[in-house]
Image: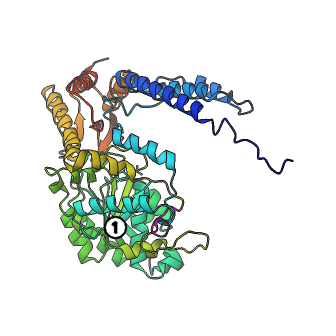
Amino acid sequence: MNRNALPSPIPALFPRTEERARVDAWLTAELEGALSRIQAGPVTPTIDMAAFRAELRGYDFDTPRPLEELLRWSLERLEHGIVQMANPRYFGLFNPRAAFPALCAERVTNLFNPQLASSASSPVPVELERHVIHAIAQRAGLPDGTGHFATGGSEANYTALLCALTAAHPAFASGGARAFPGPPKLYASRECHIAWLKIAHQSGVGRSALRLVDTDGRGRMEPRALNRAIAEDRSTGAVPVMVVATAGTTAGGMIDPLQACADIAQTERLWYHVDAAWGGAALASDRLRGLLSGIERADSMTIDAHKWLATTMGCAMFITRHARLVSEAFHASASFMPSSVSTIDPYLNSVQWSRRFLGLRLFLALGAAGWAGLGAHVERSVEVIERAKERLVALGWSVANDSPLAVLDVIPPAELGDVRALVGRVVASGRAWVACTAFEGRDVVRICATNGQTSLLDIDALVAALNAVR
Ligand SMILES: *Cc1c(COP(=O)(O)O)cnc(C)c1O
C-alpha cells in the first residue's frame, strides 16, 4: 500500500468536470424535449408494467452501465409510466406542475446539499426558512407565528397533534397516551383528510381517538355536531385535546366554518388546528384570503407549498403561535451536534433530524412572483374551474359542491351513465385526468385545477372527453 496516495475518486460517482458539464448539457436538452412531449401527450400512463418489471429484473447491478444510457432509459420510462402532472389536462388531485423558480431552487439546493438540522451547519438556509415561515404566518394573521418546513401536510398535521397532546398534559412527554386520565380524542369532519387516521395511529393515541364529526350536507363540519361529540366524550371520561378544521377539503374543496370551530375550541379549551394543506394557498390572493377568516385564531396550521403554490413535492409548512411548545415537544440533546439553540435549531423543533433545504423553492417562487403573482396564480385556477363549470352546466351536468376554491364536483346527465365508469373511460382515453370521489355520500366526478398553464383549449378537451359517449 502506498501511504502517499489514495485511490482515485470513483469516476462513475464523481466524474471529471468536463464530463459532468457534457452530461448536464445533454440532460437539460433531453428534459426540455420530454416536457414538450408530456404536455402534448396522454395524461395517463401507457406503459406495459409486466414488460417493465421484466426489464427491471435485468438491472441486477453486477455490471455498471453508462450513466447516459441509464438516464435515457429512466426518462423514457417516466415519460410513459406516470400520470403526468405537468400535462395541462391533468385535473387531478392536488398535485401541481412545478413552477420554474421551484425547479431552479432544486438545482441550487442539490449542489450545496446543506444539512438543515442545525443553525451552526446552515446558518443562512435556517434563517431563510424562518423568514419565509414568518411571512406566511403574518399573511395568515399570526404576526408572532413561527414554525418550520415539513415533508408534507401529513408530517405537519402529525406535528400539530404532538403539540396538542404535549400542551394538554404535562406528563404526555414521558408517559405517552397513558398519562391521560381517559382516552385522548381529536375532532375533524367526515370530509377531513383521512391521513388523520394514520396520524392518530402513529402518535400512539390510536385510530379510535379520531372522531369524525358530521357535516352540514354541503361538505363542511357542523358546529352543533362538534359540540355534541365533545360533550359525549367528556361524559364517558374521554379527554378531548384538539379540534381540526379543514380549509379546503380533498373531495369538495370546502372550508369548515373556521370562526365557529375556533369558538368551540376556545370554550372547550382545546388546541385549534386548521388543516389548510391545499386551501391555505388562498392566503396569497387578496381576493380570496377572506375565505379563510378565522385561520388567524388557530393554535397551529398546515399549508402545503407542494400543492397549490406549485413547488416540487415535499414542501409543506407547520405554523404555530406556540414556539415554546414546539421546543417542548421535540427537544433532545446530543453532544455531537454543532449547535443546540433550543429556539432555532430545526432538529430541536420538528419531527425530522437530518433535514433537506426545503424552503428555498417557496422563497424563490414568492420572491420572483411576489404575493400578487402567487395570488394571481391561485385566482387563475379558480377561474379555470369557473369556465369548466359553465360549460358542463350548459351541457346538462349538475354541480354537487359549492366551493369558492378550485375544486368542482359534478354529476353527469343520465345518458352518460354511471360516474365511476365514465371517469374510467376518460382516464383510460388519456385525453384528460379527473377523479371519481364520494362527496356527501354521492359519487361525483371531481375536477381540480392544479396546473398553472391550463388553457381554454385544455378545458375544451376536458369537456369533450367527459361528454364522449363510448
Ligand atoms: C394533501 C392534504 C393532506 C396530506 O398532505 P400531504 O402533503 O399529502 O402529506 C392533509 N390534509 C389536507 C386537507 C390535504 O389537502
Quadrant of the snapshot with the C terminus? top left
Question: Looking at this view, is 255 or 89 the one in front?
Answer: 89
Q: Residue 466 appears in which quarter of the rendering? A: top left
Q: Residue at x 28, y 49 (%)?
A: 366
Mark 1 sits near ligand 1, with its Cβ under 8 Å away: no
Rendering coords of residue 103 (x, y %): 40, 40
Residue 17 in view in this figure: yes
Quadrant of the rendered structure where residue 398 is?
top left
Q: Is residue 182 left or right of residue 367?
A: right
217 drawn magenta: no
Rendering quarter of residue 144: bottom left
Q: Which residue is at the far right?
A: 1
Residue at the image point whose x is 16% and y is 36% from the top: 386
Q: Is residue 45 above or below residue 189?
A: above
Q: Residue, x 30% and y 31% (percent of image)?
A: 419
Question: In this orientation, which residue lies closer to the viewer: 82 or 394?
Answer: 82
Q: Residues within 10 Å of mark 1 (few under 14, many from 20)?
A: many
Main secondary structure of the magenta stretch: loop
In the displayed structure, does residue 195 sit left or right of residue 371?
right
Kindly identify the amino acid type of the residue bearing the numbered disc 1.
Answer: Thr
Q: Is residue 224 visible?
A: no
Residue 325: image x %, image y %? Answer: 40, 75
Residue furthest front as drawn: 4
Q: Nearer the viewer, residue 143 or 202?
A: 143
Pick the front one: 197 or 69? 69
Which SS class for mark 1? Answer: strand
State yes or no: residue 347 in magenta: yes
Q: Which residue is mark 1?
A: 146
Q: Position of residue 340 (x, y in %)?
A: 51, 73
Examine the rendered structure and indicate whether residue 223 appears above or below residue 428.
below
Highlighted range, magenta: 345-353
